[in-house]
Image (cartoon, helix red, strand yellow):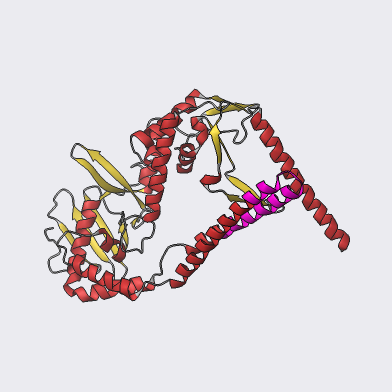
Amino acid sequence: EFRLVVMAGVAQDEVRKLSERLKFGFRQAIKNGHVLGNDKLWGYDKKDCVLTINEGEAQVVRRIFDLYANQQMGIRRISQVLYDEGFTSRKGNAFNVLTIRHILCNPKYKGWYCANKSQTVDYRSKRKIFMDESEWVMYPDPSIPAIVSEELWDRANALYKRRSKQMMSHQSGAEFHNRYPYSGKIICEEHGTSFHRQLLKSAKGEKEAWQCRVYRDKGRAACSAPQLRTTELNQIMADIFSQLAQNKQAIIDAVVTVLQSVPDEHDYAQDIRRIEEDLSAIQAKKDRLLEMSIEGVITTVEFKQRNDGFNQQIQALEERLEALRAEAEKGQRTAAQLEEIRAALERELSFQNGIHSALVTTILDKIVVKKNSTKEEIHLDIHLKFGGPWEAAFNRMDSSLCFIRPKNITPKVPIKKT
């Protein structure tokens, strides 16, 4: 048994040494002007670790950066525009959203080297962790030909980070606010897929609409469901809320009950797990630093300086971890928060300032676009988070023809003006 333990220790040490030799080889290759990494990087041809620009593909890269940074288009819209313009992936498909994101965020396109995006924290399992951007190693590399200018790349990435922060701030649908209240809540009955937001531009300005994902990806021949305008949906929801508001207290009580039953949707567990991984990675760095000090690779002064830096990072992460665990324990909204929501609902149910997106977010469960809907006449089943479903139908050719009622209930006057 002792022999097996010794052999295992020796094997592990050999794996570590091999890893160090490989890293040393990578560093030497980089110094010699050899470009490592993806051999199928879009926009480049790679031979013998040397990148050259593939002008046919580079045209797509420049178009992506132009559409994103200069024309302020979203990534999904860029994929559709490229496909419409005849630009496809190597397999002939529309560009994947992740592919476009990777192109936008890869510093090679501005002629920069980038490394240390991830590190192996366990030699045996080969488990990797992704490093924070502040720890990446980046610098201009003359061996990498730039496809776009540094100014354009920097502008595109500043916009990407800004949009990412905005998406994170609007991520929780249970919060009493939401930027796009119908996101993920409109369902195509024909395909069971969700509708995606789209901005339609005209001489009169921009209008927000929603399209089935199948229609958006493959066109009208693949899905007959009509696109819905946000203004139309808001009018329908306002009509439903107006009918419900005849018993205002009942709807307020119902909404508060829904909120009490739904915990805070912030994924504290994921944040805690990431911090624990970061702590594990820093501890691995400290262990390696100690080995380098023992082997005489670094001086005692350098060891102390870098070790103190690691300790400061650990202290900050542990404080953040403790705060996250405390937040996770709270779970439910406080009584004071619920009273604030009650007061806000009282104001919103007066509809003096139109319909508020927060009210839709809080009460609406989903909207099903029925199969028999056409571009001119649309039929919807509207499900709230309490009570039975509602049925809505309206004719775009004659805006006065519309009815909204609880499903399976026949009103005395089904047609009414909106």
Q: Residue at x 23, y 68 (%)?
A: 345
Q: Residue at x 38, y 46 (%)?
A: 163
Vertical comparison of 253 with 377: above or below: below
* Tag count: 0
**Quarter in which the N terminus is drawn:** bottom right
Specify whether residue 127 is in view. no
Residue 220 belongs to the span the image colors magenta: no
Q: Quadrant of residue 78?
A: top left
- In the visual, does 257 lie left or right of 241? right
Give the x, y percent position of residue 417. 11, 58
Q: Which residues are magenta?
A: 276-305
* Nearer the observer, 192 or 48: 48
Specify whether residue 78 is in view. yes
- In the visual, does 283 lie left or right of 408? right
Residue 301 belongs to the span the image colors magenta: yes
Vertical comparison of 369 with 113: above or below: below
Vertical comparison of 106 with 263: above or below: above
Q: Residue at x 77, y 47 (%)?
A: 295
Give the x, y percent position of residue 404. 20, 63
Give the x, y percent position of residue 395. 18, 52
What is the chief secondary structure element of the magenta stretch?
helix
Give the x, y percent position of residue 145. 53, 25
